[in-house]
Image (spheres, grey):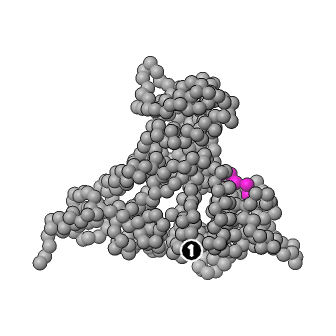
Amino acid sequence: MHMTLDHRIQQTLTSQSVIRDLGNGLILRSGRPEDEEELAAFNGRIFRNTTTQEPNSNLAWWTRDLVANHVSVRAGDFTVVEDAATGKIVSSLVWISQTWSYGGIEFGVGRPELVGTHDEYRNRGIVRAQFDIVHDWSAARGELAQAITGIPYFYRQFGYEMALQLGAGRAGYKPHAPKLKKDEPEPYRLRRATRDDLAFIMSLYAQRSARYLVDCVRDDALWRYELDRKSEKNATRREICIIEDLEGQPVGLLAHPPELWGVTMAATLYELSAGVSWVAVTPSVIRYLWATGEAYKERDRKEDFSEFAFDLGGEHPVYTAMADHLPNKGHPYAWYVRVPDIPAFLRRIAPALETNLEGSVMPGYTGDLKLNFYRSGVRLAFEHGRISIIEPWKPTLSDGGNAAFPDRTFLQLLFGYRSSDELRYAFPDCWAGGNAMRALLDALFPKRDSDVWPLA
């Protein structure tokens, strides 16, 4: 019996995974395990190579891992928009719940990823409908912030601000790769990490994390998944390497993608044990990167490989240790960040703010700080350097507070992406009243490097 479109829609709506009827024959539902291959093919097509139009097989494998192989993400963490007339997926995204830290204080973060819509179905509000749903999921999970990387402007439409440092690094070319002297042995060697290295990996990652304001917390399960459960062709997979001295003692940790990024062989994680010299070890690491890049070029039949890079954020010890070998400086982009309840987030990170204040020019401050967001605001009350109250506050004509931040620009200050002085320079309606309040803002929210490594 031939089924009409209305019957197909009604049949789909009876499924327990359906979230909403979007109208015009489109159904929004949560993902199912049996969606694995269709979601993989969909994301491969949506994020295809724009030059060759070939599907992105690496993102297809990432999708498969997220649906069926990840330690915390499940098929039900995908939203799927289905055309009931054809039964085909026309839009989708996945919600990845993580734990991040701010000055050592952990908090829940929700990450929308693989956000894509078929060309013929764009500009219908489909992505907005999905974001409405996953933001509700995030709130139900107690996540205080959401974060995504993406193209300029787009996610501002859904309450996000570009407010956290993303990327940046240093790079060099073949003439900059240090060379061994004749008959000189390589003083440090690299090997692929195993589960036996977990304790060492996690200790060095914790050491690295202390360098940054914001970081992604990676537990034992995530490291095990990273080491030996990700599919070989997963776009987010990294080769995790242990650096050893000639006696076979581990002295460091390196991670890099299992392929060239264009013409570049990049390190995305590099950390040495305390007391080990960056100047001594890094020449061996650069030679490893160069040799590995050459091997990948040959393996993948790439036309060119010309650059080694340390993609480690705006600041890193290796940039100082090997400055003459890393002449090419890359500038940071930004994460989109959403904080739906700023007072709640500030309450969570209050101990980190108090620590900042204690080491500043205003230790022991007593008084208020009223932050004016023009349509809303927040009041922080301090007693002898401790925060006693953080609460919503409404600015008025008679009380405009102590500092003002239009739109969501405060998030740039909060996440160390811009200083208060930089924000006042960029936005005429951003201000702080008097030397004391400017000093207080700088004390609580200093501009500081972050290098979030949240690969799922």
Q: Residue at x 49, y 56 (%)?
A: 98
Q: Is residue 94 magenta?
A: no
Q: Residue at x 43, y 57 (%)?
A: 112
Q: Examine the image and state in which quarter residue 277 appears.
A: bottom right
Asked if residue 150 lies left or right of residue 239, the reply is: left
Q: Examine the image and state in which quarter residue 17 appears.
A: bottom left
User: Label 1: which residue?
Assistant: 228
Picture quarter with the N terminus: bottom left
- Residue 127 percent across, percent down from the top left: 35, 56
Determine the main secondary structure of the stretch shown in magenta.
loop
Circle 1: residue type: Asp
- Residue 281 percent across, percent down from the top left: 78, 64
Segment colored magenta: 314-318
Tell me, yes or no, if residue 123 can be seen here: no
- Residue 216 percent across, percent down from the top left: 56, 55
Tell me, yes or no, if residue 7 can be seen here: yes
Asked if residue 117 lies left or right of residue 335, the reply is: left
Asked if residue 403 lies left or right of residue 63, the reply is: right
Q: In the picture shown, does residue 171 fall above or below 55?
A: above
Secondary structure under the numbered disc 1 in the rendered image:
helix
Viewer-nearest residue: 118 or 276 = 276
Q: Is residue 316 magenta?
A: yes
Q: How many marks?
A: 1
